[in-house]
Amino acid sequence: MFTPYKAGEIEIPNRVVMAPMTRSRADENAAPTALTATYYAQRAQAGLLITEGTSPSADGLGYARTPAIYTPQQVEAWRQVTDAVHAAGGRIVIQLMHVGRIAHALNQPDGARVVAPSAIAAAGTMWTDKGGMQPYPVPHELTIAQIAEVVDEFAQATRNARDAGFDGVELHAANGYLPNQFLAPNTNLRTDAYGGSIENRGRFVLEVYDAMAAAWSADRVGIRVSPGGTFNDINDPNPKATHTWLAAELAKRKPAFLHIARMGALDFDVFATLREVFPGTLIANGGLDFAGGQKLIEAGTADLVSYARLFISNPDLPARFQNEWPLAAADNSTFYTPGAKGYTDYPAYPA
Ligand SMILES: Cc1cc2nc3c(=O)[nH]c(=O)nc-3n(C[C@H](O)[C@H](O)[C@H](O)COP(=O)(O)O)c2cc1C
């Protein structure tokens, strides 16, 4: 866990990665603030930081107070974050997250719309600051021409991330957001080249990945998947087939990394299965502790291990692992609330 590693062009001093986490502290322009710079700089001893999901466009925003990277002002605001992390000795990758149908107009800028592969609303409700809990809307089904526009938005956001000083970019193809909505048969009922077979359902993800790699460099662009995950009303009856195919396609492209979020109960070992077809840098995530992560690295199943919730309340998580210091518990009532409380006020050990 404490030996250095090189993921593409990114030099990493230890294997402890901070997983992407939405914290809902962006300002009214969907830009990060000085508080966000402090939050990530506090965690800079992570081998690699991966930011909260950040939208490549107005349509890709869907939750309250989440950030984006499509306006010059947002790019500048992210620059203060990358500067603070680099000054603290860290490395930081931005997660590009287009929420697709997991959105509500009350959480979106004027003129934006809720889009998806097919016009099927997600089951359930979501929080809006303006109107409390709201049912998910029926999304607009993207036309072929509009799909190409979304691909371009990801490419432009990748250039913006490079300009903002990031060390790389992660495509969020997990957890039921737009790329995952294309991959899963219950959210993608298309009968054109983007729906039906695994190859067709995977077409959007690979087009986006390729556009991002062309916009910067494949060894600066990683991708996150969550095979078999059911979060956000996703249902893939054969996640093993879908994701083995996708990981093999990605392997040909030599991405900076493949980040696997293990979600829920699966009837196959997701890390070992994808490792068989993906020899590149593999990041394992999902309910792991130090010993669990160490085991995956020793077995060669993973190269890096990412931790989400532990990093909320333990800004110095690598040092705590290394020195066997006690771990602080996170307060989940402040995961998504504005302000410093539960965000930048967890101390390093010893307090
Ligand atoms: C507060 C919170 C916000 C999250 N936001 C994101 C996100 O923006 N993007 C993402 O890919 N995963 C997100 N996740 C999922 C985590 O990255 C991770 O997969 C999950 O928490 C399991 O890892 P853990 O057991 O180490 O916490 C979030 C998780 C939490 C707890």
Image: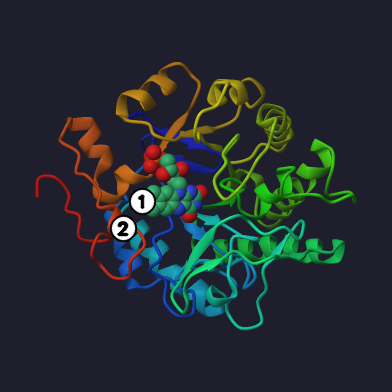
Q: Is mark 1 within 8 Å of ligand 1?
A: no
Q: Say left or right for 169 vs 311.
A: right
Report x, y in % for residue 267. Answer: 57, 22
Q: Residue at x 72, y 53 (%)?
A: 208
Rendering quarter of residue 350: top left
Q: Which residue is mark 2?
A: 41
Report x, y in % for residue 212. Answer: 68, 54
Q: Residues within 10 Å of mark 2 (few under 14, many from 20)?
A: many
Q: Quadrant of the N terminus?
A: top left
The correct choice, above or below, for 142 with respect to 47 in the image is: below
Q: Residue at x 84, y 42 (%)?
A: 196
The correct choice, above or below, for 280 with respect to 117 in the image is: above
- Cβ atoms under marks 1 and 2 closer than 8 Å: yes
Rendering quarter of residue 340: bottom left
Q: Is residue 92 visible to us here?
A: no
Q: Say left or right for 101 vs 62.
A: right
Q: Is residue 299 visible to us here?
A: yes
Report x, y in % for residue 322. Answer: 23, 31
Question: Which secondary structure lies at badge 2?
Answer: helix
Q: Residue at x 51, y 28 (%)?
A: 265
Q: Earlier in the sequence, mark 1 or mark 2?
A: 2
Q: Which residue is mark 1?
A: 90
Q: Say left or right for 163 vs 291.
A: right
Marks 1 and 2, how far apart at CA: 7 Å
Task: Please state which amino acid type lies under the numbered disc 1.
Answer: Gly
Task: Please state which amino acid type lies under the numbered disc 2.
Answer: Ala
Report x, y in % for residue 339. Answer: 28, 70
Question: Which secondary structure lies at badge 1?
Answer: loop
Residue at the extreme left: 351
How many marks the image carries: the answer is 2
Q: Nearer the viewer, mark 1 or mark 2?
A: 2
